[in-house]
Amino acid sequence: MIQVEHISKTYQVARRNAGFSEAFKALLHKQYERIKALDDISFTIGEGEMVGYIGPNGAGKSSTIKVLSGILTPEEGSCTINGRIPWKDRIAHVQEIGVVFGQRSQLWWDVPVIDSFELLRDIYRIPNQVYQNNLEELVSLLNLELLIKTPARQLSLGQRMRCEVAASLLHDPKILFLDEPTIGLDAVSKIAVREFILERNRKHRTTVILTTHDMQDIETLTKRIILIGKGKILMDGNLENIKKQFSTTKQLTVEYQGGKIIPCEGMNLLSESSQIAVFEVNLSSMTVSEAVTHISKQVEVIDIAVDSPSIDELVAKLYQKYQIQ
């Protein structure tokens, strides 16, 4: 469905030092620096996949989304989506994609949301019956009954983002690009948006490419991640396999009765109080079951919990490994 091959994109950025004299010099002779936003990137995404596209600020995530959506034209490489080149077949291409930029709105600010929806219906030339069916489904799933009667400027950020997601899906796109869709949202709004995206993918097999700094979005929605840094693709793989590769420790929280637990090699005592001890287990030295057996020989175990490093810690390790922090 999406085939990206050796795409490169460079920006020209004006630079100057601080001060009035430097500002005056810049009026007469500007100095520019060329920044390679995308540097020979390639990947393939199949129909119905949900892919997390992650990386630090300035890595090239938004530039990639803009190329895929036809907003930017790369200097080198090729990209085909459903047999079309996005920046050449733009009108036909946009009929099959939906785009949500978390920091930009496609809703008209001073009119009720439903007016924006109807204008989008006309722009995309959506047949009335298709529009009504999609509108009813989106309003129901995203709980928009009252919100669509309200001007966009009077909505909270979470309410507006739910309306933005609905607006991007009115024309039944096959592909949904989500660029920071939950930025600034409260916990309830984030959960609502995540559940809706999962349901949309399950019911309509909508392909989803998600860029975000919220790793809970990635963990909830995607099974595959593509890591980009300094304009280059650094990793592309299954999230669970990457977790196994980089999760070299587990944390054991043990509630017990009896004497004191003395850790063995491969176990590190993190904290202990009131008959509750927390250990870090090095998986290269021992398994979790071996650690539990070692503990059980010393005390009576009442309860035990095993925790893996969070997705945020995992991504931090990836950034550290590839030196893109």
Image: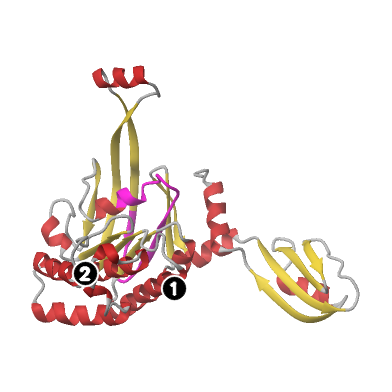
Q: Quadrant of residue 154?
A: bottom left
Dot 2 and dot 1 residues touching (CB under 8 Å): no
Q: Secondary structure at mark 1?
A: helix
In-front residue for pair 236/104: 104
Query: Residue 188's mark?
Result: 1
Residue linked to disc 2: 113
Amino acid on which disc 2 is placed: Val
Residue 144 falls left or right of residue 289: left
Instruction: Locate residue 285 relative to residue 71 in the image: left or right.
Output: right
Q: Nearer the viewer, residue 190 or 45?
A: 190
Residue range corresponding to the magenta coloring: 43-64
Would residue 52 be counted in the magenta stretch? yes
Q: Is residue 63 left or right of residue 223?
A: left
Image quadrant holding the N terminus, namely bottom left
- At 73% across and 74% down in the image, what residue appears? 289
| Mark carried by residue 41 | none
Name the quadrant containing residue 175. Answer: bottom left
Residue for point 25% across, 55% down = 68
Give the alpha-carbon distance from disc 2 to disc 1, as whole Å.
21 Å
Mark 1 crowdedness (10 Å alpha carbons): few <14, some 14-19, many ≥20: few
Placement of 126 over or under 312, stated as above or below: below
Whether residue 135 sits left or right of residue 288 in the image: it is left
**Residue drawn at the location 48% of the way across and 62% of the way down:** 215
Q: Position of residue 46 (x, y in %)?
A: 31, 66
Q: How is the image coloured?
A: secondary structure
Against 39, residue 155 (above or below) is below
Q: How many marks?
A: 2
Residue 47, visible in the rendered structure = no
Amino acid carrying label 1: it is Val
